[in-house]
């Protein structure tokens, strides 16, 4: 009995007009709610997780994974509210605690919405795979970042309003400085909208070999500000998206075939029959070559040049890969040399014949002397 009296006497003491017994009860209730959170996490979410794993889609599994941390977090403001109710705080202190509780609940909702953007990205990706829209692997991250930014901005607005600040005044102040900021950041905005143009129009993608007035090489990255291109000299060039969006872009990676065009000059000692046979053999070799596209092949004796009989060759390779293209071109050149050697023909080189006409008066002078 003495022990009970001592405990009762101890609990009757007060701190800041709140009895120690009430403080103890509030703390016990708070920790019980935290214990309930652990039970909720292991039992309820575990059962829901087992059910979602049996479904055919994986979206519900991701939803459970996304909302689990915010749901566990909600128990903290709930415990604080119970804690304050048991303490029976004064009106001002209780109102301050309500602001904290509502702010924490808003944070939980914002957190869940922010994490939900991952599910939105997965759903958009599946939708674009079915509908073949302009959204692709490059535009989806942009959409996801934009949605996340909107969620964060709205969350900040809600929290600011919760604590009694005038959001309208803040927005008006931002509007006054917005013009100066827009003027200072006009290049950044131009690059951002250039990025959107590139991602929507899709003149090229990461890994494509492109050529513009400013750069030629392989695209490595398309960011908000610039497009990074790796040149064939292995230099990394960053081109502003505002420039890339207005430049004429040649995408060599999207060629269906690659062109070979050149003039072959043979010596003037070539006979008419040799020339006709040469044209026939070269054209036949190209049409039977497995790496030459058969649709467009021209092998024609076009003109009498200054130092050679000119043969015009115009055809396409099936491959557009640079290394493979060079191998095919080398093989074609070797076969052409074989044809010329077989016909006893020679490739001409630039030359000039000089004829000197003897002057009769000069001859007479030389004869008299």
Image: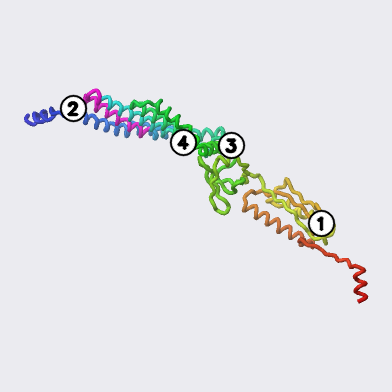
Give me the C-alpha separation between circle 1 and circle 4: 66 Å
Comes first in the chain, label 1 or label 4: 4
Q: Nearer the viewer, mark 2 or mark 4?
A: 4
Give me the C-alpha separation between circle 1 and circle 2: 112 Å
Give me the C-alpha separation between circle 3 and circle 2: 67 Å
Residue at the left extreme? 2
Q: Is residue 79 magenta?
A: yes
Comes first in the chain, label 3 or label 2: 2
Q: Are dots 4 and 3 in contact, CB under 8 Å?
A: no
Q: Is 363 drawn above or below residue 80 in the view shown? A: below
Residues packed near mark 3 inside 10 Å, few (<14), some (14 to 19) or many (20 plus)? few
Name the residue tied to disc 2: 22
Considering the numbered disc 3 on the image, is that residue within a helix, a strand or a loop?
A: helix
Name the residue tied to disc 3: 201
Name the residue tied to disc 1: 275
Q: Position of residue 59 (x, y in %)?
A: 45, 33
Q: Position of residue 205 (x, y in %)?
A: 56, 42
Considering the numbered disc 2 on the image, is that residue within a helix, a strand or a loop?
A: helix
Give me the C-alpha separation between circle 4 and circle 3: 20 Å
Q: Nearer the viewer, mark 1 or mark 4?
A: 4
Residue ID at (60%, 46%): 214
Q: Are dots 1 and 4 in contact, CB under 8 Å?
A: no
Q: Which stretch is magenta?
A: 67-93
Residues packed near mark 1 inside 10 Å, few (<14), some (14 to 19) or many (20 plus)? some
Residue 349 in the figure: left or right of residue 227: right
């Amino acid at each position: 009995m003495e022990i009970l009296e001592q405990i009762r006497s101890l609990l009757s003491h007060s701190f800041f007009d709140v009895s120690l017994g009430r403080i103890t009860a509030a703390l016990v209730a708070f920790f019980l709610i935290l214990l309930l959170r652990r039970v909720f996490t292991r039992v309820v979410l575990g059962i829901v997780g087992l059910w979602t794993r049996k479904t055919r889609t994986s979206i519900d599994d991701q939803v459970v994974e996304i909302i689990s941390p915010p749901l566990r977090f909600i128990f903290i403001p709930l415990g604080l509210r119970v804690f304050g109710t048991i303490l029976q705080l004064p009106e001002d202190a209780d109102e301050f605690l309500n602001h904290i509780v509502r702010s924490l609940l808003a944070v939980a909702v914002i957190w869940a919405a922010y994490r939900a953007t991952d599910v939105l990205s997965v759903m958009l990706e599946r939708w674009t795979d079915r509908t073949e829209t302009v959204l692709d692997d490059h535009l989806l991250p942009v959409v996801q970042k934009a949605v996340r930014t909107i969620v964060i901005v709205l969350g900040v607005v809600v929290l600011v309003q919760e604590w009694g600040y005038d959001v309208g005044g803040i927005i008006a102040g931002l509007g006054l400085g917005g013009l100066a900021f827009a003027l200072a950041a006009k290049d950044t905005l131009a690059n951002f909208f250039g990025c959107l143009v590139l991602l929507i129009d899709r003149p090229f993608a990461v890994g494509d070999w492109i050529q513009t007035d400013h750069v030629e090489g392989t695209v490595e990255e398309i960011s908000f500000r610039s497009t990074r291109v790796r040149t064939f000299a292995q230099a990394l060039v960053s081109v502003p998206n505002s420039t890339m969006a207005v430049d004429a872009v040649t995408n060599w990676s999207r060629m269906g075939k690659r062109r070979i065009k050149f003039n072959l000059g043979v010596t003037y000692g070539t006979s008419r029959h040799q020339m006709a046979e040469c044209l026939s053999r070269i054209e036949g070799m190209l049409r039977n070559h497995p790496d030459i596209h058969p649709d467009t092949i021209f092998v024609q004796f076009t003109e009498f040049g200054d130092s050679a009989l000119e043969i015009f060759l115009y055809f396409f390779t099936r491959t557009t890969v640079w290394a493979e293209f060079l191998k095919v071109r080398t093989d074609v050149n070797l076969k052409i040399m074989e044809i010329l050697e077989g016909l006893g023909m020679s490739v001409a080189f630039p030359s000039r014949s000089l004829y000197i006409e003897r002057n009769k008066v000069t001859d007479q002078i030389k004869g008299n002397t």
